[in-house]
Amino acid sequence: MNSRERVLAAFAHKEPDRVPCWCGASEGFWAKAKGTLGLDDEGLRRRIGDDFRRVVARYAGPEIALSPGVTSRTPFGVERVGLGWGQPTSHPLVGASVEGVHAYSWPDPAWMDASHIRSELEPYDRQYAILGGDWSPFWHDLIDLLGMEAMYLKMHDEPEMIDAILGHVVDYYAAVSERIFDAAGDEIDVFFIGNDFGSQHGPLLSEAMFRRFLLPHLARLVDLGHAYGLRVMLHCCGGFVELIPAMIEAGLDGLHALQPSCAGMDPGQLKDAFGDYILLNGAIDSHHVLIEGTPQTVREQTRALLEIMKPGGGYVAGASHDTILEETPLDNVLSMFEAIAEFGVYANGTRS
């Protein structure tokens, strides 16, 4: 069974030959691992047994200079400063009217070039599960454009403002993903999107507010992926168990990077409640196990988690955060993937 077949079996809630592996890593960790092991990108992915590969569109629009000291700029004109993606320096729509929202300078999806994707996928020869589509962090863009406090107030006082902004944002993301899928959708397996709806202590908004403002846009992206015959998987950090039933109702196929240290995210409880309805991905604790543990404790904890999560399929094993941080000991990460390969084998799994 190759990686693609293994992953698709897991999405179908069937037991493959072994539990599929996922590795998302920060640039710092990835560079450290390649340097230490003397491997290139593909060599490292094969070394750890990663069953996924990812393709993205490239920006090909007008050149836009960043302001001095700015780290990055979102597609919607919000400049950010600080570590990683940083924090927004302003919230350009906080004082706008609904008319002002419609008149805002929204980006052109044609600025994203997908013409290279098909050729990039040829070397994989359908051996791996391919992630594609735009990341589509519409919730984060809403926060950037308004500021979090103003956003919550406008949800109560000016809901039409929230609807207008999200409409434009998701119009853009859907159109970019359509460009990607039109270019190479028959070679892509999973539409992978990301929005962090949870905090350490629970959802960042109530289930009622989630259903009112965000679920329709999540459902729109799910429907888009399904129209191209793709599975749709959402990256979502934090504790958000209260929102999972609505996500399942919208047709979402997978949840990524489950964090067991957050409220309501006990892996066994998630498996019991939702394991028959949605693929679960992650849950090997990035902080308390991978960073603070030893290779032996990582091995033991990974084995214990697999015993909970692997029965019946519907599980992908990996860290509880999408980007393994640079300070994570390489030996611990290697121990995690070696344990997945050893203890993730199904006795009577699906065979090709």
Image (cartoon, helix red, strand yellow):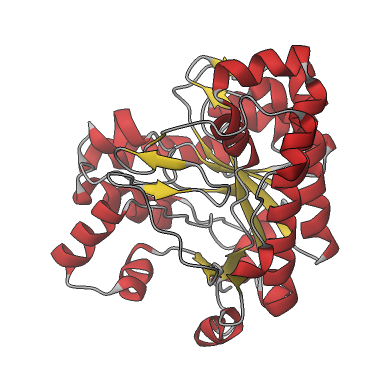
Q: How many marks?
A: 0
Judging depth in this view, the residue of 226 and 107 nearest the camera is 107
Judging depth in this view, the residue of 29 and 319 nearest the camera is 29
- Residue 146: x %, y % from top left: 59, 27
Quadrant position of the C terminus in the picture: bottom right
Judging depth in this view, the residue of 323 and 351 nearest the camera is 323
Q: Is residue 134 left or right of residue 85?
A: right
- Residue 307: x %, y % from top left: 51, 38
- Residue 304: x %, y % from top left: 43, 35
Which residue is found at the position 68% from the left and 54% from the top?
173
Residue 118 in the image: above or below residue 244: below
Q: Is residue 61 left or right of residue 165?
A: left
Which residue is found at the position 62% from the left and 58% from the top?
134
- Residue 339: x %, y % from top left: 36, 50
Whether residue 138 is visible to the viewer of this picture, yes or no, is yes
Whether residue 189 is visible to the viewer of this picture, yes or no, is no
Q: Residue furthest left?
A: 36
Judging depth in this view, the residue of 147 and 34 nearest the camera is 147
Residue 308 placement: quadrant: top right
Residue 260 in the image: above or below residue 333: above
Q: Is residue 8 left or right of residue 119?
A: right
Which residue is found at the position 81% from the left and 47% from the top?
220
Residue 36 placement: quadrant: bottom left
Quadrant position of the N terminus in the picture: bottom right
Q: Is residue 351 left or right of residue 2?
A: right
